[in-house]
Image (tube, grey):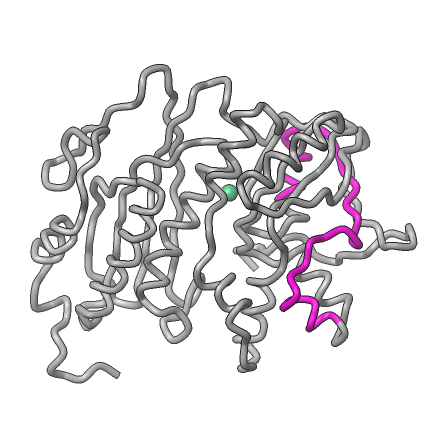
């Protein structure tokens, strides 16, 4: 509950909020006209193409205000969008932020949210160049549009995987899904797991290193579980794949929960959402170079399977028998 004396959004209004935000935005060379005019004016670097992606985060669908500290929610709102630009091998540059806000929302919440958003923006040199605000009659809705750039030959698509390529993934899988599952059950969640759910790090430097060294043939970010997300690479590349369950990279915090019900926990690593790691394919001849390149970035990388010419994506147990995942990734409409 908000104390009735706490200043709310209703007090400062839309224009008050916009000027409150715009005074905190640093200037960037590639932004000719930022917040304040009818549209922003930005300059692409010579020879670059524009990458654009948009995402919505809805209260009680994608986040709960009781679990998400506003500062971390601000960071995550931009992090998930930056992750999409990274997944294309792009350099994130500009963002638009639109908010539908309940009028009774405390100003302190919005200030912290914006502070988190702009901190993530500054970390990745992303300029906030505009957006929209309106009043919401139910929960908080956040919409972020991100733009990035890359030279045409370095843009990585989902469609480039070839049979016999290795399937790789950065970091560890399933931590965020496990944290969410435990929060939903009212269990106490360890700091490491909670951090993976609430404050994900988009793998921009790893993605740029891979594309600059021409190492990846296809790439995607893992937002809906590696099984579903690799499935998108398989679909668009007209290939299949075989993932080895034993090779999935699991964090020590995640492994602590493995004994409980290992099949369920494995499903979380395969099908749980919000890892924001990179899943990519690369020619087998590039194995050492991929490992070296990721080591230089300080990012763990694991080979989890192989691209096949048959169209199915299968998961194999350590003994070679097929693992029944029973589920695909997180489906937003179920
Ligand atoms: Mg994505």
Q: Quadrant of the N terminus?
A: bottom left
Camera-nearest residue between 91 and 53: 91
User: Residue 292, how many percent across, how many down?
Assistant: 64, 35
User: In the rendered structure, does residue 324 fall within the stretch colored magenta?
Assistant: no
Q: Compared with residue 278, is residue 181 higher up or lower down, i.e. above or below? A: below
User: Residue 177, how many percent across, how many down?
Assistant: 58, 63
Q: Which residues are magenta?
A: 229-258
User: Residue 187, how many percent across, how many down?
Assistant: 56, 81
Q: Quadrant of the C terminus?
A: bottom right
User: In the rendered structure, does residue 247 fall within the stretch colored magenta?
Assistant: yes
Camera-nearest residue between 249 and 228: 249
Q: Is residue 34 left or right of residue 298?
A: left
Q: Residue sitting at 59 percent across and 31 percent down?
A: 158
How many callouts does the rendering have?
A: 0
Quadrant hosting residue 211: top right
Q: Residue sitting at 41 percent across and 50 percent down?
A: 79
């Amino acid at each position: 509950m908000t104390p009735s004396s706490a200043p709310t959004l209703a007090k400062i209004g839309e224009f008050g909020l916009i000027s409150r935000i715009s005074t905190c935005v640093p200037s960037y060379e590639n932004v000719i006209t930022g917040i304040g005019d009818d549209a922003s004016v930005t300059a692409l670097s010579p020879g670059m193409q524009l990458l654009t992606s948009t995402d919505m985060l809805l209260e009680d669908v994608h986040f709960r205000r009781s679990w998400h500290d506003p500062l971390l929610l601000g960071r995550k709102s931009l992090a998930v969008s930056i992750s999409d630009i990274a997944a294309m091998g792009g350099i994130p540059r500009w963002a638009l932020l639109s908010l539908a806000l309940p009028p009774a929302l405390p100003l302190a919440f919005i200030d912290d949210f914006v502070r988190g958003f702009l901190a993530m923006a500054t970390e990745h040199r992303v300029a906030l160049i505009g957006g929209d605000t309106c009043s919401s009659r139910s929960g908080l809705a956040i919409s972020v549009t991100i733009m990035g750039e890359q030279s045409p030959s370095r843009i990585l698509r989902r469609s480039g995987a070839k049979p016999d390529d290795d399937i790789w993934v950065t970091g560890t899988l399933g931590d965020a899904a496990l944290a969410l599952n435990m929060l939903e059950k009212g269990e106490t969640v360890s700091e490491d797991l909670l951090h993976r759910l609430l404050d994900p790090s988009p793998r921009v430097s790893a993605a740029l290193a891979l594309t600059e060294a021409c190492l990846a043939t296809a790439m995607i970010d893992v937002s809906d579980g590696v099984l579903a997300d690799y499935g998108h690479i398989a679909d668009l590349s007209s290939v299949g794949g075989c993932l080895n369950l034993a090779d999935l990279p699991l964090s020590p915090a995640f492994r602590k929960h493995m004994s409980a019900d290992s099949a369920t926990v494995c499903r979380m690593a395969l099908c749980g959402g919000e890892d924001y790691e990179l899943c990519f394919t690369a020619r087998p001849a590039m194995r050492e170079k991929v490992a070296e390149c990721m080591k230089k970035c300080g990012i763990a990388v694991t080979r989890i399977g192989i691209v096949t010419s048959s169209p199915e994506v299968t998961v194999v147990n350590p003994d070679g028998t097929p693992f029944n995942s029973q589920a695909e990734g997180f489906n937003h409409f179920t």
